[in-house]
Image (tube, helix red, strand yellow):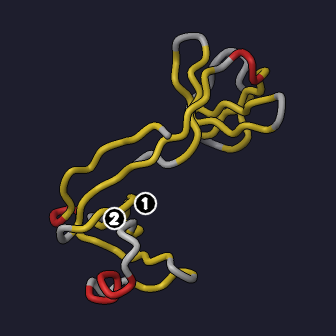
Amino acid sequence: MRDGYIARWRGEEYEASPDGEEVRLYRPDAADGFEEIRPGRHRKIVSANEVQLDYIRTGCVWRGEPFLVLAEHEGWLRVEYTGGLAPVAQRLGLEEFEFGVYQGWAPVSEVLDVREYRV
């Protein structure tokens, strides 16, 4: 599940982290100009004006309600309720992560309409 910045640079799409006038591009394997920062993680810093930057969110429906997908682990999705109704969040058994923000774990088999959005 993707959730965060991505950058299109020289015809390829990379996980990205903007930082002012620069953007850090990440990839899992070695490539020309990318330095290994840890095993399985390589980084290249480019000028922000060289990339097309987008933010990706993954949305879904669980038990008839709208959610964002934050993570996936062993057949479960970490989801965040986006419907804005505290009674619904409580009925679904979600935990209040912070004021007005409700999250929980949903079995992948119960989650519908998973799709990415560029925002």
Estimate how packed mark 1 is, as few (under 14), some (14 to 19) or many (20 or more) residues with alpha carbons within 10 Å.
some
Q: Earlier in the sequence, mark 2 or mark 1?
A: 1
Q: Which residue appears at 59% of the width and 27% of the height?
A: 7
- Depth check: 73 or 59 in front? 59
Give SS at disc 2.
strand
Taking 43 as reference, is 102 left or right? left
The amino acid type of the residue labelled 2 equals Leu
Is 67 placed above or below 28 here? below
Q: CA distance from mark 2 to mark 1?
A: 6 Å
Say few, some or many: other residues with alpha carbon within 10 Å of mark 2 (under 14 / 14 to 19 / 20 or more).
many
The spot of residue 46 in percent (x, y) is 76, 22
Q: Is residue 26 visible?
A: yes
The tag on residue 110 is none
Q: What residue is shown at x 27% (from left), y 83% (from top)? A: 92
Please state the horizontal and vertical placement of residue 102, each as a whole percent of the image.
44, 78
Q: Is residue 76 left or right of residue 84?
A: left
The residue that mark 2 highlights is 77
Name of the residue lying farthest toward the right: 21
Looking at numbered disc 1 in the image, what kind of residue is underneath it? Ala
Q: Which residue is mark 1?
A: 71
Direction from residue 45 to residue 107 in the image, left or right: left
Is 20 situated above or below 85?
Answer: above
Residue drawn at (39%, 66%) of the image = 82
User: Which residue appears at 74% of the width and 18% of the height?
Assistant: 49
